[in-house]
Amino acid sequence: MKRSFIREILEAIDEETISFAGGLPNSLLFPVDDLKSSANNILKKRDVWQYSLSNGIKSLRKKIAKEYCKEGFETTSDNILITTGSQQALYILARYFEKRSIVLEAPSYLGAINTFKLNNLKMKIALLKTDGIEIKTFEKAFEKAKLAYLIPDFQNPTGTTYSKSKREEVAKIVKKNNGLIIEDSPYSELFFEEKNRSISSLIPNNSFHLGSFSKTLSPSLRIGWIRASKKLIQELLVIKESIDLHSCGLSQHLLNEYLKDDKKYQMHLEILRKFYKEKSEYFCKQLDTYLPEFSYIKPKGGMFVYGEFKGIDSFELLNKCMKKKVVFVPGCEFYLNNKNFYEIRFNFTNSSLDDITKGIKIIAEEIRI
Ligand SMILES: Cc1ncc(COP(=O)(O)O)c(C=O)c1O
């Protein structure tokens, strides 16, 4: 087992480094004052310090369920399992499906790949195209595996978003084979134009829909969730209990208090979307100006710009840039076979505009030396 390369980069860099590497939300946008006043309201209550329910506190599950219902995806608190970040949701599911075959996008999220490896899942890949997974390969692999892991909204690492028709095609294949998908959606609220309909809403009993407050509020809370049929949630609960009994009660109560004012949260999301959209546009403009040889597709949301420098080894480039205190992630890290040499993932949410320009100019200089 290899450690996450991204976490290793994050450990190796210092404060002067311009990092386009991690998938970090911008800390300037954490709603610290509101979270602080929510914390003040709950900390004096004795029950928030007590053990709590394994599936998560009911009022928080109800609030999450309500968000699904708003979109016409019928959901109750019994369909929700609160997890310690969506990373734990992936671990619980990997334990649940231990040793099974699973189809995933190539490239895909490193944290999922590592969790699947650890739990001996046999991974089969289908390439990710600009409008979603390559459907013929997906169908063929899914017929056998009957299980898939997909990130249809502003994917990590590529930023790709599935088209409406791809979502429908995938749902049809899953239904036809009576299989299951794990739809990982930590970025779906970070849309620049419009929210996409989840694949899970088309196949509510054949899906695990994963959400997280890490990218929308704060990753430090470590609160995510799984939405699935009541039967599946009950089965997952056995694994969840054996890991940590329940996710942090303080974080759950704090979030629950914060979310009591839904308008405040919705306004916060609006601010995030606007800010990240501007950052993304700025990042792309700087790429076009200083690195026109980088070919990429403009993201429609999320946190990443992904593309390639044809003929330039991204690892070699990273090594050179690291010496000049600029980092990013070579694309090969997100492939099972590590055989991709030219692709790169840039995170655009966490750097100042000045640092974006400075960092991109440094990469341009290193390429032209
Ligand atoms: C696709 C995807 N899934 C899951 C996670 C884990 O998020 P968390 O555990 O913070 O909710 C991440 C984090 O970057 C991610 O990109």
Image (cartoon, rainbow, N blue to C red):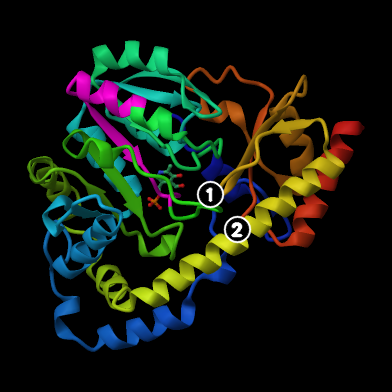
Give the quadrant of residue 206: top left
**Disc 1 + disc 2, Cβ < 8 Å:** yes
135, above or below 52, in the image = above
Q: Nearer the viewer, residue 56 or 99?
A: 56
Left or right: 140 in relation to 364: left
Q: State the mark number for residue 302.
A: 1
Mark 1 to mark 2: distance in Å? 8 Å
The residues colored magenta run: 169-188
Quarter residue 181 falls in: top left
Residue for point 16% across, 37% down: 205
- Is 185 within the magenta? yes
Residue 168 in picture, x, y percent from top left:
34, 30
Q: Looking at numbered disc 2 in the image, what kind of residue is underneath it?
A: Tyr
Q: Is residue 288 magenta?
A: no
Q: Is residue 144 left or right of residue 6?
A: left
Q: Is mark 1 within 8 Å of ligand 1?
A: no
* Place of residue 44 in the rendered image (x, y in percent of width and height, measured from the top left): 24, 89
